Amino acid sequence: MRPTLPYPPHPNELRPARAEDSSMTVHAAAPPASAEHAANEAFAELLFSPEGRTDPHSRYRRLREAAPVHHSTLGTWVLSRYSDVTEFLRNKRVGKDVYTFMAGRFSGAWEEHAALRKLASTMLWANPPAHTRLRRIVNRAFTTKRVMAHREFIERRVDELIEPIAAAGGGDICNDFCFPLPLSVVAGLIGVPQEEAPLLRDLIRDFQRTFELGMTESELRKADAAAVLLDDFYDRLVREKYRKRGEDLLSALIDTEDEGERLTHDELVQMCHMIIAAGSETTTFFLNNGIRLFIENPGQAELVRTDPGLLDRAIDEVLRCDPPAHMIPRTTSEPVEVGGVEIPQGARVMVLIAAANRDPAHFTDPDVFSVNRQESPPISFGAGIHGCPGWRLARLQAEVVFPVILRRFPDMALAQPLRHRPRVAFPQVEAMHIRFPNGSVEK
């Protein structure tokens, strides 16, 4: 089986979906052909062009202005307005049918692939009542008290990781700080020994490529290999915790019941993977994006530096301006009307969180980074029953990291141009080297 690579036609050949297409029924008049063409072109650039990966927000704006509820030539529906996105994510007729979504991305028997089977088996793709049971168990074990107990470890780990960068007068803050910190934190939370946590890094990155729409055959092979190794790793970890409990989240998950039922061995294995992979990758992007935004907006950085009371707003603004996940998948179990357009049952939908977070109908000067902003809340952690369960831990790390970075490196600057990774759902840079032009490093 070969994965289907959804490369669109040349922009000149992109056409609007036909009104007679049974997968597109509208209550309101369909956008004119020129608008559909513009939306298709913007979506194609976003997914498949280097320019779109470097500057996705201009494509989101074009897409939102042309056709905010868009049926793309790839067969996927795309939502980009804030009100549409929040309403859609909370709709009970919206869920995650992995078979519908995978069938639209891959030809043949996708379940032959270890990575895709693994992706399908996590809570990320579960629906009620299975999702309800899993989520209740996670919520009972993954408490605010358990999260806050890790603050001291986070503070200590931040100091350990930042000191070499400070001593060297700069360095790659993305790979030497923003990635190892969340991985250490979430590994410690689950109960993975700290010396083993770095072994998971490359495996997680190889596997996470399964979330990207333009996944290639070679990337799928690497993801398959990573899935097997990750399952083996977590299988051993779960067996060890069965024999000897600790104070970690995995031990709590083993012992937590829901209506007399506990998580199975396989569910625990996949839960470990989901929490560590999601908790490390997304928080890495969150922290890195925040540091970059402060570098690019020194006036805003100075406001937070001089008024710590602005930190909560600054964190929200980082999440709004550049969320760690730009888009998330959903499917419809019944027809759903969004913005006057009916999306049919069994549709594949990409919800553009990053586009919604810059909707001018909800945010004044949406492309401006302003730590004084007090408007609609960002939806970067999702909404509805599938909202991110680890948002408190991610936010706690930002509460520790941003003040330390702003205080210790008051004149930080980018040392090299950023090189963007070929990612769309989880965009990131290969590295982010910073320097201190005036040699100013505070203690």
Image (cartoon, helix red, strand yellow):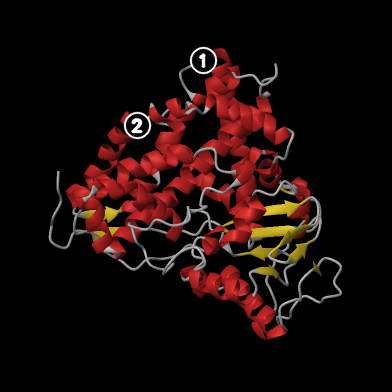
Q: Residues within 10 Å of mark 2 (few under 14, many from 20)?
A: some
The image quarter in which residue 275 lies: top right
Q: Hey, what amino acid is under mark 2?
A: Arg
Residue 342 placed where, x, y %?
77, 63
Residue where numbered disc 1 is placed: 245
Vertically, is 162 above or below 63? above
Determine whether label 1 and label 2 are within 8 Å by CB: no
Figure quadrant of the N terminus: bottom right
Q: Hey, what amino acid is under mark 1?
A: Arg
**Does residue 443 appear to the left or right of 42 in the view shown?**
left
Residue 407 placed where, x, y %?
20, 48
Residue 179 placed where, x, y %?
40, 46
Between residue 218 and residue 349, name the one nearer to us: 349
Q: Residue at x 41, y 69 (%)?
A: 365
Between residue 3 and residue 296, name the one nearer to us: 296
Camera-side mark, 1 or 2:
2
Vertically, is 397 above or below 237? below
Vertically, is 136 above or below 56? above
Q: How many labels does the image show?
A: 2
Residue where numbered disc 2 is placed: 151
Q: Which of marks 1 and 2 is nearer the N terminus?
A: 2
